[in-house]
Image (cartoon, helix red, strand yellow):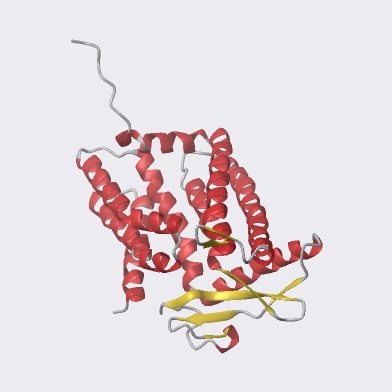
Amino acid sequence: MSIEELRLVFALLGLATLGYSFHSKMDNKALISSIGWISICTYFFLDTPHYIELADPVLILMSAATLPIGIAAGFWEFNTQKRGKEKPALHWLKGAVFWSALPYLTISWIPYLSVALVWFTAVQAVFFLKISGIADLQVGPAQVEYFDGSTTPFSEFTGNPWLYLEPLGEGGFFVPITYADGSPTGVSIILACSALQSMIVFVGALIALKNSPWKLRARGLLITLPLIHILNVFRNAGIIYLDMTYRDWQWLGIGMFDFAHSYAAKVGSLFAMFLIAIVLFEILPELHNNILRLMDPLLPKKRSNVS
């Protein structure tokens, strides 16, 4: 069994158990939930070596932290339900993880969907650069980078375009950005450039709010998704422009592309998500309350003054 097939097993097991535990009305779901937490987090944890190869410190930290967090969540929920209780905030988090992972994994496993989203992302970044007068660029044909480093057009893809589990190279399914004459700029758009991961976090978080009216949740989605998408278009266009203009710039051995992509853009994206979350807290107080309740184990316990 390859590492990708092993990850598939963990992902399917995690999705099935978390989804069933979240939507089922069965009382005793402690064991099922615990299996789900550990399984789905193991799937993301096994992606850590890939991000180490990419030398992306933010994604390395986030993926490496998933497994201990999943073990802690499973242990917490098991102990809580063992005492005959259920923590609403933890139940919400379970649904948020399920409804976030389901669309993300569906798109990442189906090459047709991945390429369509990558192409859509590339077209908009190039369009923005063109209409703003910054650069006259074009979108090249979709490509595939295999694990051995070789690349071919997606039209010549040798795998199953409806379900592909074999490991790919660093670029995976990508769309190159070219100059108007067709010469390469050295920059390509991949699935991670689509902001899919950022958007589905909010999608899952809002869908899982069972006690909030659908109108408020829909309003939250209408605010969140277009805003993240527009900010991501600016982000991609900015990275392309900076790399083209300051390609020889370096700071502490870090080139402009790596600095803009792996550091500046990541910090900016996390800050933007923080601001969006604050807005959603005002619209959906249940979301804010759930997050605060999940932080209870990390907060110091209040001491009683009664002797």
Q: Residue at position x 55%, y 46% from top?
A: 273
Q: Residue at position x 48%, y 47% from top?
A: 205
Q: Is residue 258 above or below residue 65?
A: below
Foreground of the two, 24 or 69: 69
Q: Position of residue 31 (x, y in %)?
A: 23, 53
Quarter of the figure with residue 232: bottom right
Residue at the farthest top position: 307
Q: Is residue 234 left or right of residue 62?
A: right
Quarter of the figure with residue 282: top right
Q: Position of residue 147 (x, y in %)?
A: 43, 81
Q: Position of residue 139 (x, y in %)?
A: 69, 75
Foreground of the two, 292 or 143: 143
Q: Is residue 97 above or below residue 52?
A: above
Q: Position of residue 142 (x, y in %)?
A: 61, 79
Number of residue marks: 0
Foreground of the two, 265 or 31: 265
Q: Residue at position x 32%, y 78% from top?
A: 2
Q: Is residue 88 left or right of residue 102?
A: left
Specify the quadrant that holds the C terminus. Answer: top left
Q: Is residue 280 left or right of residue 99?
A: right
Quarter of the figure with residue 279: top right
Foreground of the two, 74 or 277: 277
Specify the quadrant that holds the N terminus. Answer: bottom left
Residue at the farthest left position: 307
Q: Residue at position x 26%, y 37% from top?
A: 85
Q: Is residue 112 above or below residue 46?
A: below
